[in-house]
Image: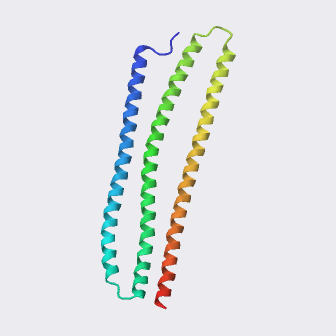
Amino acid sequence: MSFMTPEQFAAAQKANMETLFGLTNKAFEGVEKLVELNMQVARAALSETADNTRAALAVKDAQELLALQTSLLQPSAEKAAAYNRHLYDIAAATNAEFNKAAEAQLADFQKNFLGAVDNAVKNAPAGTENVVTLVKSAITAANNAYESVNKAAKQAAEIAEANFNAVTNTAVKATQATAAKTTKRAAA
């Protein structure tokens, strides 16, 4: 008894290659987005450095220098937080594409495996009904376990994203508070 015909094997290999090429393209898209983001950040940083240098050269006293430093502190923290958010979004989108492909592959594998089990059941000798029931129960239990783990992983990812957002917001607020305190001290 064979599980796959040569045509089915060839079709499976073709589908696997298509999946591989699709995932490779998604990975390249993620890298392209990352490179684009880094180029934008580098370009903005160069421009800001030039502006900040001009502003620093125009400073006339220590109080003005302190005020300039304070004014530069808050936007830097906000930009770092925005950059990290963009990085996270790129990674999450790429990861979602990989997970989607993996889930599709798993569903296809499960369908093929269940087809093979059903085929084996049709050809099973009399008296093996208990074994067939046991195999089907094991498959159902494995599917339920996978779904539970997958659900827990998605919940963990959601919690991690919420924590990331909370930490980012806290860091920006702390920087804003520090900048405000420094401004008050400089004015005094």
Please give the count of numbered marks on the rendered protein: 0
Expressed as whole percent of the image width and height from the top left, the position of residue 9 reads 43, 18
Tell which of 59 and 136 is nearer to you.
59
Residue at point 42%, 70% (across, down): 76
- Residue 98 occupies quadrant: top left
Tell which of 143 and 49 is nearer to you.
49
Asked whether, in this view, residue 110 is left or right of residue 10, the answer is: right
Asked whether, in this view, residue 134 is left or right of residue 31, the answer is: right
Task: Check the image and report above or below for 142 versus 130.
Answer: below
Residue projecting furthest to the bottom: 188
Expressed as whole percent of the image width and height from the top left, the position of residue 65 reads 40, 83
Task: Check the image and report above or below for 88 versus 148.
Answer: below
- Residue 125 occupies quadrant: top right
Tell which of 103 and 52 is nearer to you.
52
Residue at point 43%, 48% (across, down): 93
Residue at point 63%, 23% (across, down): 136
Expressed as whole percent of the image width and height from the top left, the position of residue 140 reads 62, 29
Expressed as whole percent of the image width and height from the top left, the position of residue 138 reads 65, 26
Residue at point 54%, 23% (across, down): 113
Tell which of 100 and 21 is nearer to you.
21
Q: How is the image coloured?
A: rainbow
